[in-house]
Image: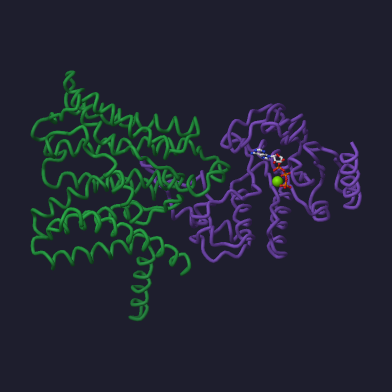
Amino acid sequence: MSTEALRAERIVKTFGHVTALAGVSMHVARGEMLGILGDNGAGKSTLMKILTGFHQPSSGQVFVNGAPVTLASVDRARALGIECVYQDLALINGLSIYHNLFLNRELLRPGPFRLLDHRAMRERARAALADIGVNIPSVDLEVGQLSGGQRQAIAVARAVASDARILLLDEPLAAMGAREAGLIIDLIERLKSRGDIAIVMIAHNYAQTLEICDRVMLMQHGEVTYESRAAETSAAELLEIVRREYRAARAG
Amino acid sequence: MSAAATAGGLRGRLREFLLRPEASVIVVAVVLVIYFQFANVNFLTNANLQTLSQFIATPVIIACGEIMLLICREIDLSVGQVFALAPFVMERAHDWGLPVPLAMAVALAVSGGVGFVIGLITLRLRVPSFITTLGMLFLITGLTLTISRGFPADTPGGKLLTNLMGNWGYAEICWAFAVVALMHIVLRHTRWGLHTIATGGNAIAAAEAGIDIDRIRMGNFILTSTLGGFAGLLEAFRIGSTDPLAGGSNIMFLGVASGVIGGTAIAGGAGTIIGGLVGGIVLGVLQDGFTLQGINAFTFDIIIGAAILLAMVANIHLARLRGGAR
Ligand SMILES: Nc1ncnc2c1ncn2[C@@H]1O[C@H](COP(=O)(O)OP(=O)(O)OP(=O)(O)O)[C@@H](O)[C@H]1O
Ligand SMILES: [Mg+2]
């Protein structure tokens, strides 16, 4: 198929004596969208956080554009074009919307003092939100005053506005109403149709995930238990696999 | 533009001002000044304004550091001890043959070094800064007593430098204003300030956004200690000598109280430097005003304590009201 953007091989991650990831491999190509499904506590978010440089893997290797990389920090992953919408959204409630949208990549005024360019950030934030079509009264509002869905929209807008090459979405639709979810899905499909962005999305809605993703991956107890092209499987089949694995785990 | 629109604009501005966390304290400060001026003819005189400015300067400079630390959910209880340590370091460095400006630089570096050690212990060994700096408080008191052998030290320096650094009546407050202006810009208009707020508001989110939260905390520990040392040097130049037990917890608490009265959240994530300045002014006006009234020293502390409590309670409730008003 097309060129590979991101690959992870045999990723293991332990926290003390908890094994969150027991050797997970995944890959996603440019223009492709991978969906990750699976139980609570399966290790999906942990995998994401390794791909963003937030966690360091206990073992395993990550490749970006085919080259082995060490994602030693979030900044390093970002420099490689990896952006993420975290499950907890990574927003600062006490800061304004526009400050959150530009958190840690603030626009600065020209000159030696490196002062923040509040006006430019406000304007660009307004434009970015209008672009998505999300209803936000003012970019000066504190994020803490927004609804759950609005907060999620801000987090998605932040990742998208940053010109990501590899976009990681950890349950980006979880708190959204139907209209907003529709907007975000539209946005994702628009990004996909550009053909140069690789997208990984974690979700819990099987039917919806199969509809928007090209490929899906099932994660359970820190392992990948199933992988398929979206067109070649169904929600019923995936649910059956989940049940079977669950029964096997309980019996074994 | 119609007159009504202008009036609405003005009212809007006034409303905007009153909704700022500093606003209520500014009102309190003005009311206090008016009260003491009427109650005591000597309040707004040059001589008293000098005294007042000296009451205010030290807590305000210390508040600037503590506010940054409170915003990122840390505190420094030992800054009042660094205040006393710095002049002795300067005096020793001068004894060893360094010119006074260089000796001052050494003193500031040592002060900053204390912050660095606090940061290392707090961040590496994961000890809450409340505990780290409580230990540091005793440690530095001992250090200063050892260096000084228990005797006060005369402040070195020529006339010009001495006047500039604090001996001229308004020098200290000018420095305090300069520190306030600088720190206000740092907090509101630089990445450092924004990342400090982000670190205190939600440390995990800040780290997920790629902010090096330990670097932010470390920097603010160093900043606070350095400012504490700087305030100590100013006081040494003003008085001409330093007692090894100068400063102490009292000025540290005045600094923290200034910040909190000014609207800095003790739970982190929000704060204002300008509020700290006004908070410091309120405390200074109270102390100075009651001193002029000739109030008995014992009652004095009761009144100051009650006033601090009142101001803090008022501010916490006003902050809640503001949150609800939006
Ligand atoms: N920082 C951490 N420290 C210790 N354990 C952790 C940490 N992060 C995750 N874990 C553990 O790793 C396992 C996987 O967690 P993870 O958040 O990756 O699950 P998930 O698949 O995203 O679940 P969900 O669908 O509920 O979001 C869990 O058992 C969790 O307790
Ligand atoms: Mg998760």
Q: Position of residue B320 (x, y in %)?
A: 45, 64
The total of numbered circles placed on residues is 0
Which residue is at the front of the view, B11 or B265?
B265
Q: Give the answer, above or below, for where A78 lies relative to A173.
A: above
Q: Which chain is purple?
A: A
Is B152 positioned to the left or the right of B65 in the image?
left
Q: Give the answer, above or below, for where A55 lies relative to B250.
A: above
Q: Residue furthest front?
A: B298
Which residue is at the front of the view, A197 or A199?
A199
Which residue is at the front of the view, A244 or A131?
A244
Which residue is at the front of the view, A15 or B178?
A15
Q: Position of residue A76 (x, y in %)?
A: 58, 34
Q: Position of residue B146 (x, y in %)?
A: 24, 24
The residue lying at 90 percent from left, 43 percent from top is A247
Q: Position of residue B167 (x, y in %)?
A: 11, 40
| Image quadrant containing the N terminus of chain B | bottom left
Answer with the quarter of the image where residue B69 lies.
Answer: top left
The residue lying at 39 percent from left, 30 percent from top is B116
Is B128 positioned to the left or the right of B226 in the image?
right
- Color encoding of the figure: by chain
The residue lying at 76 percent from left, 39 percent from top is A28
Is A166 positioned to the left or the right of A228 in the image?
left
Q: Residue furthest top?
A: B96
Q: Colour of chain B?
A: green
Is A241 positioned to the left or the right of B128 in the image?
right
